[in-house]
Amino acid sequence: MAAPYYILTGAGHEVVFASPEGGEAPIDLLSMKAPFTTEYTDRFLADPVAMFAARNTRKLRNIDYSTFDAVFFPGGYGLLWDLASDSFAIKLIRDFHKAGRPIAMVCHAPAILRDVKKDDGQYLVNGLNVTGFKNAEDTEIELLHHLLFSLEDELKNRGANYQSKANWEPNVVVDGVLMTGQSPASAVPLAEALSERLAS
């Protein structure tokens, strides 16, 4: 969340934080420790404006997303339990894709694509190039068997051309308006790619 926030606001874009219930966004405590911390997370935690925004997110369902140019879903395991099955988030992604507006997702966020379908009933990711947190990364931190489902397996089951690199290596895959990043190290290049897309 931190890197995209600063990269996008630094490029002059207005960033609005939203979450399923609104209010304080739950932050995975693991992301507050090395090796997941970065200069961006340190800056974010010391930034009263950024922290206020994270503690006072808007309720996703109350947002008129037709007025937004792009959407960025940061990662976190929690979204496997809420956003991945949230009908509003699923409809948002489908509508953004139909309208040709960028959809950026990093780490476990591409799990939200699992149940997104096009108007013809086909899965949105069928035939598309995507990435996201890989099984080997979940296994390395001993969480694979504790998750609701495997992002990698589910995207492959939906017909996606899942592409990954070595564990924790930056990896951004762009297919049309869909922009996905593999793991935390991909947040910066993904946000930069989104910023460039918005500039064009």
Image (cartoon, rainbow, N blue to C red):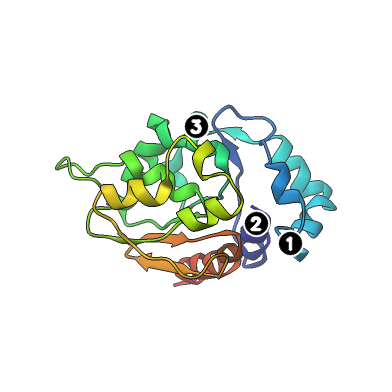
For the residues labelled 1 and 2, say whether their Cβ atoms are less than 8 Å apart: yes
Q: Provide residue 124's location: percent of width, then percent of height.
A: 26, 49
Q: Which mark is residue 5?
A: 2
What amino acid is found at the position of numbered circle 2 in the picture?
Tyr
Horizontally, residue 29 falls left or right of residue 193, namely right
Q: Examine the rendered structure and indicate whether residue 35 appears above or below residue 200.
A: above
Above or below, 111 relative to 178: above
Question: Where is residue 53, by image quadrant?
Answer: top right
Residue 160 vs 18, above or below: the answer is: below
At a point 58% along the width and 55% down the height, the residue shown is 140
Give the amino acid at mark 3.
Trp
Can you tell which of label 3 and label 1 is closer to the viewer?
A: 3
Q: Residues within 10 Å of mark 3 (few under 14, many from 20)?
A: few
Mark 2 nearby-residue class (10 Å; few <14, some 14–19, many ≥20): many
Of callouts 3 and 2, which one flags the residue occurring earlier in the amino acid sequence?
A: 2
Residue type at mark 1: give it: Tyr
* Rendered residue at 73%/42% (across/down): 29
Residue 156 x %, y %: 30, 52
Q: Which mark is residue 142?
A: none
Query: How far apart in space, not on screen, are marks 3 and 2 (Cα)?
Result: 24 Å
SS under mark 2: helix
- Residue found 58% across the figure and 62% down from its top: 187
Mark 1 — residue?
Answer: 40
Q: CA distance from mark 3 to mark 1?
A: 27 Å
